[in-house]
Image (spheres, grey):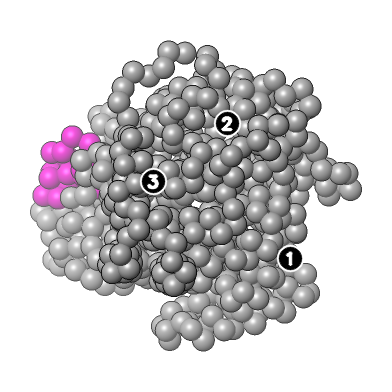
Amino acid sequence: MSDKINSVISDNINYVVKSSVKFPTSQWLNLLNNCLEVEELPGAFRKIARRVVEDYPETRVWFARQLGKRRSYIVGAGQESYRSPSEYELLDDYWLFIQHQRQLPSRYRQLLVACCRVVIGIFHEQGKSGDSNAINTNR
Amino acid sequence: MLKTEREDFIDDQQIWRQLEENQDPEPAEIRAILDKSRAKERLEPEETAKLLQVEDRELLEEIFELAREIKEEVYGNRIVFFAPLYIGNKCINNCLYCGFRRDNQAIERKTLSSEELAEEVEVLIDQGQKRLILVYGEHPDYDADFICDTIETVYDTTKENGEIRRVNINAAPMEVEEYKKLHEAGIGTFQIFQETYHHETYDRLHPEGDVKSDYQWRLYGLDRAMEAGIDDLGIGALFGLYDWRFEVMGLLYHTIHLEEKFGGIGPHTISFPRLEPALNTPFIAKSKYKVSDEEFKKLVAIIRLSVPYTGMILTAREDPEIRKEVIPLGVSQIDAGSKIGIGAYKKAKDGYLPEKEQFHLGDIRSLDDVIRETCQMGCIPSFCTAGYRVGRTGDHFMSLAKPGFVHKYCMPNAVLTFKEYLEDYASPETRQVGYQAIEEQLEAFESEQRQLVEEKLEKIDRGQRDLYV
């Protein structure tokens, strides 16, 4: 499993650092750094979701974890628009959902997914995935 | 087991005080409370206590009318269908009102093997069911690992286009670590009914020394489930064990407790079964707290008004006539085609008589018959499991349900899953009535929503399944 995770991290980091004029590498590396500052994966997901909604305010973004047939909500950001969300399988049974995903340029979406995979992979490697579905009584 | 030594959030004296102090409420007071419900705000106990005291016919009619209105506004005119599946009836408890109690020699004890379970699931799939609630007695054989195995068997069983897409669980309260196993298995709702919220009655009906005699262990069972990450919870009371007004107050206090402790996430569903006759269970005939049909209608409507955004389950314990009257008063989920004996679905399909069951079922019609009647009542039957598969669970679900917007998903998904049912399982009569109901619903959608649904309906016509928004 560890080799697989390392390879996912490395492939996706390589993807993220490929420069792009519209979505410069520094922007994504900053987001990655911010995500890795938090203690547990849900906190990192929250930062990512908020960032996407800042960039594209009409979207709603949320993360869920696959448990059997259930995909259980973790965190999200943005205004509900009652549209079918697009679904992205990330890594380790985590999923990303985006409403109004057509607002996001295709390159941005690909970078976003790559970024999420790197974060999950690193948290997994560091044993910090935590109980991402445990209910936080203070949220 | 030692009784848990802690205070709990049900204060019997306070509830009685609230009920007694709020007798003979002024119509103006009642109408102000109705306005609060209309705004989809959860009521405070004092307010619910006032509603429970209403006897005036005109005010009662206003309560019933508002209950109908709120249900439609929050969930739309859809009714979600499910079926119970009893896995095993071994039980270490001796609850006086229960046909499965330990000392009841008239009941044959049985637990489904995984092969028998798969056979039961196949019969249910053949009916068109997509959502099950698995029911277990309280017994060391039915631990978390066993329950996880049964969940896996249910999810793994498929037949042609059919599969079970959501498994809810009704089982004994557990430790946090055990709940975590169930959470990982991907359950829908975890249900625990307190049976009665009245401490003294609870003690009297659950003999000292039984696991179930620990009131607080059961009362906080859903807190532990939540701590384990299970954020879809079902609460309930068995009406007929104690005064029905008190039990409604208990359900409300339980809701408030969960909402306050878990960041606004209250129960996903509330159940309100009435005590029914059970084999060799004389307690039931003697109970002085039986709930009349009129009281039952009143309590259902008042629960809807008290917690406007929470799902409400009416089971097939009730006979068809009363179901028809009560469903419009705020009910969002019902079961149909139900059997509550162990292995009873397969036995019934093979032509055997019903097994000795936990209690008497009032509505023994087939799923198809109940679906048809539901359409004739102006509702859309739904087998939707979409929220649970796109992460609209827990506080995400509550953020949609509380302001009353969840119907924007419920209605399209009801139509899509109902269309699947009509294509794959319905009788010709039900198909005719059902297509008509879908046409009428399509007319009611806004144009963008209608277009989205029609695109997906065409895909179902072309053979695709499990489509949702």
Position of residue B370 measured from the top left corner of the image (x, y, whole percent): 69, 64
Occupied quadrant, residue B381: bottom right
Callouts 3 and 2 on one subunit: yes
Occupied quadrant, residue B462: bottom right
**Residue A46 located left or right of residue A33:** right
Q: Which of the two marks, 3 or 2, is nearer to us in this view?
A: 3
Pointer 3 or 1: first along the chain: 3
Q: Which numbered marker is on residue B249?
A: 3
For badge 3, the amino acid type reads: Met
In the picture of the structure, the residue carrying the numbered disc 1 is B369
Pointer 3 or 2: first along the chain: 2
What subunit carries mark 2?
B
User: Farthest right residue?
Assistant: B351
Q: Regarding mark 2 in the picture, which secondary structure is present there?
A: helix
Residue A27 is a magenta residue: no
Q: B148 above or below B449?
A: above
Disc 1 versus disc 2: distance between alpha carbons? 31 Å
**Residue B208 located left or right of residue B177:** right
Magenta range is: A29-45
What subunit carries mark 3?
B
For badge 2, the amino acid type reads: Ile
